[in-house]
Image (cartoon, rainbow, N blue to C red):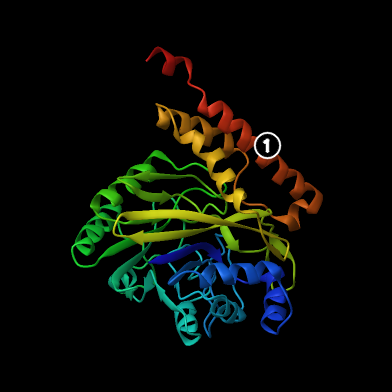
Amino acid sequence: MRIAIAGDFAMNDGLRGPGRTWLAGSPSPGLDALREVFRSADFVVANFEASIPGDRERPEPSKILIRADEGSVAVARALGIHAMTLANNHAFDFGDSTCGTLRSGGIECFGAGKDEAEAAAPLRRRIANEEVAFIGWADRETIDGIWADDGTPGANAVSRGALIEQVRALAGEVDRVIVLPHWGRDYLEYPSPAMRDLALRLIDAGAAAVIGTHPHIVGCNEAHAGRPIVYSTGSLLLDDIRLPDGTMTVAYPPSIALVALLKLGPGGVEVDFVAFRCSRGTFQALPAASARAVLERNNRFLSGGNYGDRYDRYEARMRAWGIRLRTDVLGRPAAAAVRIGRKLQRRVAAAVGARPSQEDERS
């Protein structure tokens, strides 16, 4: 059985045009390549990182808002995506109609609902003669979003303990459990100690794989008990965010995205990766070696002792750069300078943070 899991998806702003022309028959080598990757899988899941506005809009001005055009659904369907998790911090930016719109377009959704119980319900499907349960979950302790509670619609953000117990229970009922967490900090490549601890506990509870999103940047991967953990696949198809008058509010930097290809068999779970690049309304496939190169570079940070201390030093150095980039305030040249500065700072912070401190060495 082969399952493809992709990251943040929303054909908005600069990507709407290329998506529509591709649907109309115009060539797009990048989208064609992505469709072929998805066709090689028995089931395809992605994270719908946006809200499709309905009759009632409910904007939250305290946070970045992402709206998607309804054409996103047709593109997702044409690419071969079967299901979307809505367990993220943008699925309810403009009301609660997104899941209904996806389903009307032939795409299943999970990880959100009219209350906590419905939002936490897994998507259970029979794939290649095995029953697989997918859980979409968002970490409300580190992310600001609209979360489902008793009688309140929103995304699934149950407690970490409840999530672990749900995985343990499902592992006794189905053949495979795959957890898709939305977690971490924007533009941080490395998982916090809390994320690593939760990932290990989910695997110990019976998860076949843990594949994460949210940082909008490719993260790290590791294995536990022979099962894969991918902390962030990066943004798949996500572009600059604009106001209705066309003013840009957030400029996403050009990014590499990974599609995780899970091969689940009697001998266990294997994972491979395919890489793509999204930048200013363009989308292209990258050489196969690109995926491994990014992960191998980032994975070096996971090795060695005193991980918590090293991560704290890394995060402290990155904090000054923030996560929001308002192009309407900074202007494009300044925004580009900030993006370059962030990239350099990540490299410096990773290098310095990976070195043991004097206290580490004494211990």
Q: Callout 1, which amino acid?
A: Leu
In this view, the residue in front, 30 or 20, is: 30
In this view, the residue in front, 201 or 3, is: 3
Question: With respect to residue 145, does 226 lie above or below?
Answer: above
Q: Position of residue 17 (x, y in %)?
A: 72, 76
Question: With respect to residue 144, does 313 lie above or below?
Answer: above
In this view, the residue in front, 146 or 290, is: 290
Q: Residue furthest right?
A: 333
Q: Position of residue 246 (x, y in %)?
A: 75, 70
Q: Residue drawn at (46%, 49%), measured in percent from left and top? A: 184
Q: Residue furthest top?
A: 362
**316 sits left or right of 327 in the view:** left
Q: Residue drawn at (60%, 49%), measured in percent from left and top? A: 289
Question: With respect to residue 181, does 41 lie above or below?
Answer: below
Using a 10 Å C-alpha cutoff, classify the residue at mark 1 as few (fewer than 14 neighbours), some (14 to 19) or many (20 or more).
few
Q: Position of residue 23 (x, y in %)?
A: 66, 82
Q: Residue drawn at (70%, 46%), measured in percent from left and top? A: 339
Q: Residue drawn at (38%, 67%), measured in percent from left and top? A: 1
Q: Is residue 27 visible?
A: yes
Secondary-structure class at tag 1: helix
Q: Quadrant of residue 360?
A: top left
In this view, the residue in front, 110 or 119, is: 110
Residue located beneath label 1 in the image: 344
